[in-house]
Amino acid sequence: MSHSTHTVFEVLPTSDGEILATTHYGRVASATCHSFDLGVVVAHGFSGSRDKPPVRAVSAGIRPYAGVVVPDLRGHGRSSGVCTFGDLEVLDVDAAVGAARRLGYRNVITMGWSMGAAAVLRHAAFARTGETVRGYAVRNPVDAVVSVSAPSRWYVRDTPSMRRVNWLAETATGRRVARRALGVRLMPEIWPMIPASPLDVVGRIAPTPVLFVHGDRDTYFALEHPHSLAAAAGEGSQLWIITGFGHAESGLVPGLLDRLGRHLPELLAGNGEHAGADRPLPAQPGPARPLPARGDTPELPGSPWPA
């Protein structure tokens, strides 16, 4: 016999004063598992929210293996604030990890998707080093990180999909479209300073285990992104390149969530599958093509907006 519970946190405050609409889904428990052994904080991608079908599918797919805490990141869904593309979202992740700890989860893994992946990577690094985000402390370290469809850097403009995202961010018309069509409230001004990118900080996460997952059909971020991140993270990181997988929650392929769920205990233990085992491309290619410097892209040098 199995059972499950869920609790809605009507208000989950962040350290900088935002309020996050957050749902807790208890693990689908049975006589063979302990429901509070493992909790997963899910950080959705740009334009996602906990009530949208792709994010709900992720929560449902992980629940047989762990409890799930999923907030609407700032500027999304029913949460307050504006989207900052992975910068202040670190504080949203930190608040959700703290909530998972208070619920009683003995081990907490963050699982970020696209923009949310950038946030969980930066959160894991800052929680280990004690660095702050815009002057706010990051207080809640995690036991492992799963990064799905992550960008390695800001200002990505080398795919049509990302050029569309940047149009939303950079223009008044685009911001109106984002709010009305996608339900996303975007920051109206540029960053006061360029935040450290995932590639800048990923080397600080070790020895916390980190798994990078990327699809070979991702139309937003090319394969140079996961390879660069895994190389910078060091030997303890794990990299899966998934055949047929597109981008983030909306690009899921059958079986991936089950594979992730089954692998979570191995990730905590530091045991990994061989990178790229389910696709014909080599697991360890040659050196990645150099990435453009932040803000120095052919399309718009010095742009203040992130990917």
Image (cartoon, rainbow, N blue to C red):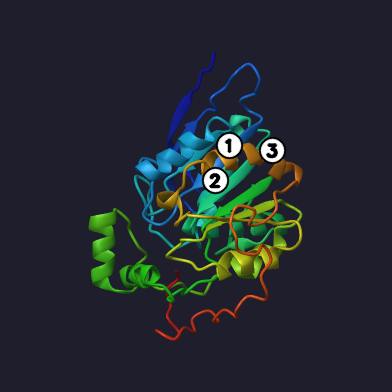
Lower sequence index among marks 3 and 1: 1
Q: Nearer the viewer, residue 50 or 185?
A: 50
Residue 15 in sight: no
Q: Which of 288 and 291 is in front in this view?
A: 288
Q: What element carries label 2?
A: helix
**Which residue is the site of mark 1?**
100
Contact, mark 1 vs mark 2 (Cβ under 8 Å): no
**Which residue is the site of mark 3?**
265
**Nearer mark to the viewer, of 3 and 2:** 3
Q: Residue at x 71, y 55 (%)?
A: 128
Contact, mark 3 vs mark 1 (Cβ under 8 Å): no
**Which residue is the site of mark 2?**
95
Q: What element carries label 1?
A: helix
Above or below, 153 relative to 43: below
**Nearer mark to the viewer, of 3 and 1:** 3
Residue 211, image x and y in percent? 64, 53
Quarter in which the N terminus is drawn? top right
**Marks 3 and 2, how far apart in space?**
23 Å
Q: What element carries label 3?
A: helix
Quarter in which the C terminus is drawn? bottom left
Lower sequence index among marks 1 and 2: 2
Kind of residue at badge 1? Ala
**Nearer mark to the viewer, of 1 and 2:** 1
Residues packed near mark 1 inside 10 Å, few (<14), some (14 to 19) or many (20 plus): many
**Marks 3 and 1, how far apart in space?**
17 Å
Residue 289, image x and y in percent? 60, 79
Outermost residue on the top side: it is: 1
Residue 269 figure quarter: top right
